[in-house]
Amino acid sequence: MHRTVRLFMLMAMALAAAGSNAQTPPPAIEGPVYTATYVEVLPNAVKDGSALLKQYRDATRKDAGNQRAEVVQEASRPTRLVVLAIWADQKAYDAHGKAAHTAQFRDKLKAVHAAPYDERVGNGMAVAAKDSLKSGSVVVVTHVDVPPPSKDTVIPMLQQLAEASRKDAGNQ
């Protein structure tokens, strides 16, 4: 049985609750900055796209203020990937956005992507401890859009789901 990692599920929920996307610049965030960058590559470019995303992840991990960067691929649709990252603060995230390797990644991605990348930026919510992803782990990334008037109602429900999920058999 595959092991389940839900750290990033909660991160994605928090990002969605923040409600930002690539078209609308997010407001400055205090404390750590969490990003989920959704990428869809062309069916004939899965190998090249995956390699590009892994190069980007490795370069990102070397950026000042990067606390974590992972690339995961959808099991049933290998053309869909997501880069999950945590930054120490807004300053570190902004510097990463201006880094040469980030510009190079975005330029190279144009040759293999099936749609524009979608970067979600937000605060953490019910984030678990940082553990290394083990080979064969199943990472659950869940995107939840919440209209701003419902945010204060939905966040406690998501936190409750997070705590209950951590008790599931096999959850890392």
Image: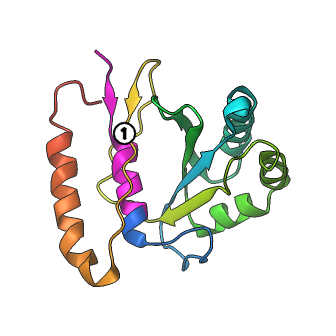
Residue closest to the far front: 43
Q: Tell me the quarter of the image containing the C terminus.
A: top left
Picture quadrant where residue 57 is located: top right
Q: Amino acid at mark 1?
A: Val
Q: What span is in magenta?
A: 1-15
Position of residue 106 relative to residue 30, above or below, is: above
Residue drawn at (19%, 41%) of the image: 165
- For mark 1, what is the residue? 140
Q: Position of residue 155 (x, y in %)?
A: 24, 67
Q: Tell me the quarter of the image containing the N terminus.
A: top left
Picture quadrant where residue 146 is located: bottom left
Position of residue 150 relative to residue 137, above or below, is: below
Position of residue 59 relative to residue 76, above or below, is: below
Judge left or right: residue 92 versus residue 26.
right
Residue drawn at (22%, 49%) of the image: 162
Asked whether residue 68 is in view, the answer is no
Q: Secondary structure at mark 1?
A: loop
Asked whether residue 133 is in view, the answer is yes
Judge left or right: residue 44 versus residue 69.
right
Whether 2 is among the magenta residues is yes
Whether 43 is among the magenta residues is no
Residue drawn at (85%, 54%) of the image: 100
Q: Position of residue 75 (x, y in %)?
A: 46, 29
Q: Position of residue 36 (x, y in %)?
A: 52, 53
